[in-house]
Image (cartoon, rainbow, N blue to C red):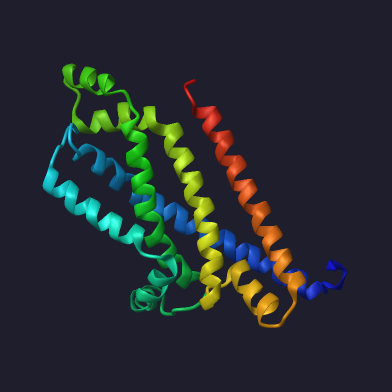
């Protein structure tokens, strides 16, 4: 079946895979930069946190939940004006990074918040008793103790973004999803669609394996 793949088509596969890596890599990185501080704040401002503030926590948490509950394909279309303003276009790899990042940030925030909840509260109380500041509690207690869980959460995020990036291909976002739609579906070439799925499976497996390895290395257990 795959013997019919021309050199040009294989080159197109390589280009599409690179576009997927760029989309997932950039959006995951920027999403983590935004989501990790957001998750830390959600934990600190929650009940029992060192910066407990129910009003602020409810407001920020509501925004996070609203973005998380919006189906990605709807988010993709809804923020086209913002995407066009930031990148100058609503199609292509760069344009797809914008909605992917917006989808990733609240996802990361909730995963980070959940990881921080697992940190033994006794450690925080001990740090407070020794006069630690909020900054010291965050960077010397919470984040180091929760790091394996945070890495596991980031791994889940990158895997999810891989699926989202394929969905972005449905509206010209580039990457393997775009290749599968244009060649596999619109041109009735099922072997291309199958090849795209296989490549995505291998890509996700590689991401998951790397994340699992990092978690094992960082785990205190």
Quadrant housing the N terminus: bottom right
Q: Residue at x 31, y 30 (%)?
A: 142
Instruction: Establish if 220 lies above or below 50.
Output: above
Camera-side residue: 40 or 87?
40
Position in image of residue 109 (x %, y %): 34, 47
- Residue at the far right: name it: 3
The image quadrant of residue 129 is top left
- Residue 40 against residue 12 in the figure, above or below: above
Task: Decide if residue 137 is on the left or right side of residue 107.
Answer: left
Q: Nearer the viewer, residue 109 or 8?
A: 109
Say left or right for 57 vs 221. left
Does 181 appear above or below 26? below
Instruction: Identify the residue at image location x=77%, y=69%.
Output: 10
**How many marks do you count on the picture?**
0
Residue 112 lies, in percent from the top left, at 36, 41
Which residue is painted at 64% across and 53% down in the image?
A: 203
Q: Position of residue 21 (x, y in %)?
A: 58, 59
- Up the image or down, 32 lies above or below 24; here it is above
Quick one: which residue is furthest to the bottom in this view?
187
Query: What's the residue at 52%, 73% (across, down)?
Result: 173
- Residue 185, percent across and down? 66, 78
């Amino acid at each position: 079946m795959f013997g019919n793949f021309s050199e040009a088509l294989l080159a197109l596969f390589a280009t599409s895979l690179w576009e997927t890596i760029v989309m997932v890599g950039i959006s995951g990185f920027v999403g983590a930069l935004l989501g990790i501080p957001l998750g830390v704040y959600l934990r600190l401002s929650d009940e029992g946190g060192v910066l407990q503030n129910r009003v602020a926590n409810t407001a920020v948490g509501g925004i996070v939940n609203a973005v998380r509950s919006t189906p990605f394909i709807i988010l993709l279309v809804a923020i086209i004006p913002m995407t066009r303003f930031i990148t100058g276009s609503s199609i292509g790899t760069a344009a797809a990074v914008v909605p992917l990042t917006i989808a990733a940030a609240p996802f990361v925030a909730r995963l980070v918040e959940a990881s921080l909840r697992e940190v033994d509260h006794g450690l925080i109380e001990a740090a407070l008793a020794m006069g630690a500041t909020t900054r010291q509690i965050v960077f010397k207690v919470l984040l180091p103790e929760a790091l394996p869980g945070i890495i596991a959460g980031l791994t889940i995020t990158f895997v999810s973004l891989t699926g989202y990036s394929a969905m972005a291909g449905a509206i010209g976002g580039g990457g393997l999803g775009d290749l599968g739609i244009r060649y596999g579906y619109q041109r009735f070439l099922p072997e291309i669609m199958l090849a795209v799925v296989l490549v995505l499976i291998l890509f996700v497996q590689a991401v998951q394996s790397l994340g699992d390895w990092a978690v094992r290395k960082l785990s205190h257990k």
